[in-house]
Image (spheres, rainbow, N blue to C red):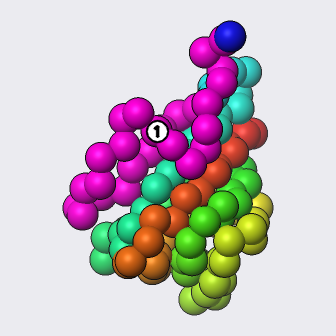
C-alpha cells in the first residue's frame, strides 16, 4: 500500500469549522496540485476574489454551489458538474449548501 491511497469522501483531518472551508492537498508534483475542498454553507468573504496564476479544473462531487465571476456571470454547480477556470479569471464562491457538505475536487496546473 502507498500513501497515495484514500477515499475522497473521508478525511482523517476533517473537522467542521463554520468559519472556513476545509482544504486538503491530495497530490502535488511537477506543477500539478490536486485538492479536496469541503464546504458546508461557506462562501468567499464579501469583496474577495480568487485571482490565480494557474488553471483550475474543479468538479463538485457532492452538494450544490454557486460560483460568481467578476463579470457578474454566475454558474450553479450540482453534483457531477465541472468547470475549467482560466488563469486570472477572478471568481468567488457565492454560496454552498448549508445543510450538507459540498465536496469539491480541484486540479491546479499551468
| Residue 46 in picture, x, y percent from top left | 31, 77
Q: Main secondary structure of the magenta part?
A: loop
Q: Quadrant of residue 103?
A: bottom right
Q: x, y (%) of residue 106?
A: 64, 50
- From the viewer's perspective, tell me whether residue 92 is left or right of residue 56: left
Q: Which residue is mark 1?
A: 11
What residue is shown at x 45% (from left), y 78% (from top)?
Answer: 97
- What residue is shown at x 25% (from left), y 56% (from top)? 17
Residue most extreme to the top: 1
Report the magenta residues as a range.
2-26
Q: How many marks?
A: 1
- The quarter of the image holding the C terminus is top right
Specify whether 103 is left or right of 84. Answer: left
Residue nearer the viewer, 5 or 32? 5
Crowding at label 1, few (<14), some or many (≥20) Cα neighbours within 10 Å?
Answer: few
Vertical position of residue 15 compared to residue 46: above or below: above
Q: Residue visible at 51% across and 66% down?
A: 102
Hey, which quadrant is residue 82 in on the image? bottom right
Query: Does residue 32 appear in the picture of this structure?
Result: yes
Amino acid at each position: 500500500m502507498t500513501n497515495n491511497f484514500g477515499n475522497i469522501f473521508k478525511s482523517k483531518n476533517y473537522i467542521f469549522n463554520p468559519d472556513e472551508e476545509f482544504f486538503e492537498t491530495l497530490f502535488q508534483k511537477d506543477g500539478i496540485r490536486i485538492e479536496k475542498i469541503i464546504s458546508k454553507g461557506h462562501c468567499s468573504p464579501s469583496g474577495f476574489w480568487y485571482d490565480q496564476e494557474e488553471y483550475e479544473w474543479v468538479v463538485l462531487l457532492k452538494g450544490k454551489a454557486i460560483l460568481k465571476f467578476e463579470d457578474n456571470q454566475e454558474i450553479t454547480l450540482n453534483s457531477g458538474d465541472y468547470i475549467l477556470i482560466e488563469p486570472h479569471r477572478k471568481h468567488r464562491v457565492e454560496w454552498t449548501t448549508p445543510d450538507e457538505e459540498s465536496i469539491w475536487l480541484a486540479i491546479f496546473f499551468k
